[in-house]
Image: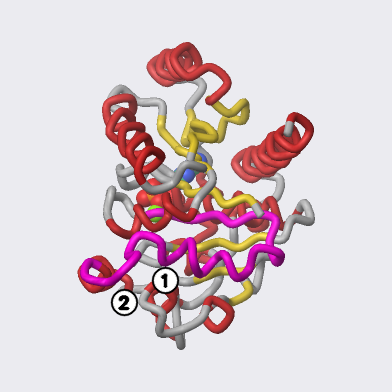
Amino acid sequence: MHIFAIANQKGGVGKTTTAVNLAAALAANGQRTLLVDLDPQGNATMGSGVDKRSLKSSVYQVLLRLSSLADARAPSPSGKYDVLPANRDLAGAEVELVDLEAREMRLKAALANHRDEYDFVLIDCPPSLSMLTLNGLCAAHGVIIPMQCEYYALEGLSDLVNTIKKVHANLNRDLKIIGLLRVMFDPRNTLSNQVSAQLEEHFGDKVFKTLVPRNVRLAEAPSYGVPGVLFDKAAKGAQAYMAFAVEMIDRVNSWKETA
Ligand code: ADP
Ligand code: MG
């Protein structure tokens, strides 16, 4: 079981779109996949076709140990993956976890019981470096960082990289950056191309080969509760996320060969 957190403390950079579409694309490739929604906004939940307003239990109850993961998860009606859903309740967890023991290891512990059930677990983190994101980073083997190729993209990146280093040093020796995913890419924009080239220069093979273009079909899909890769399979955005899933599967397999 490979556990990847999809993180970037900036909002609106494509975390949830990446989480939902990678989950659906991995599932379409026969990978047993769980998508964990760690954002109180519940966008990954809704985007997977699970109604956040009618949950009996959610990731909130799992983190507070009021419910088991087995009781809280739900299958995505459109994708062939499971969702550990979230809604507004989760906003309270931030404060409620503070005084509890092993507060940042709650998600890790919950996932440990299901090690043999999934090939991939993807964690959609909220736009902050909070206790919730910390639970995601402590549970994960690696981080996938979606980013837009714009002028300020690199600025925020150093905060995230420093946080990942601290978590690695103090809480989770397994954690590493798997890669940077360029999203909402506009090939006709000169600045996008410059920033993209800079990323490749600084981060080398930590930059995924797949480029996800800006594509309106990906933005439309969530309102139908269907992942973009299934909503319009022919769209450029859908094809990019399908290619990204294959790139991830190849990468994971290459670890096995060198291990
Ligand atoms: P985050 O989870 O980081 O806040 P989202 O995935 O919710 O970011 O994306 C922010 C907005 O951008 C959403 O409205 C989403 O539909 C849109 N979006 C994300 N990726 C793309 C893309 N490749 N092309 C077009 N719109 C996109
Ligand atoms: Mg999001």
When the figure is inspected, residue 17 is found, relative to residue 156, above or below; the finding is below
Q: Which of these two is toward me, 2 or 105?
A: 105
The kind of residue tagged 1 is Ala
Where is 134 relative to 254, above or below? below
**Residue in the picture at 46% in, 84% down:** 67
Please state if 171 lies on the left or on the right of 176 as rendered: left
Residue 108: x percent and y percent?
48, 61
Q: Residue at x 74, y 55 (%)?
A: 31
Q: Is residue 100 magenta?
A: yes
Q: Inspect the magenta stretch and tell me whether residue 117 lies in it.
A: yes
Q: Residue at x 67, y 57 (%)?
A: 230
Residue 76 position by quadrant: bottom right
Q: Residues within 10 Å of mark 2 (few under 14, many from 20)?
A: some
Q: How far is mark 2 from mark 1, CA to CA?
A: 8 Å
Quadrant where the N terminus sits is bottom right
The residue lying toward the viewer, choosing from 244 and 163, is 163
User: Of helix, strand and loop, which one carries label 1?
Assistant: loop
What are the residue bounds of the magenta stretch?
A: 98-125
Q: What residue is drawn where x is 46% and y is 53%?
A: 16
Read off the residue under disc 1. Answer: 86
Q: Is mark 1 within 8 Å of ligand 2?
A: no
Can you give x and y, in whole percent of width and height, for residue 165 in the image? 36, 34
Circle number at residue 89 = 2
Nearer to the camera, 189 or 197:
197
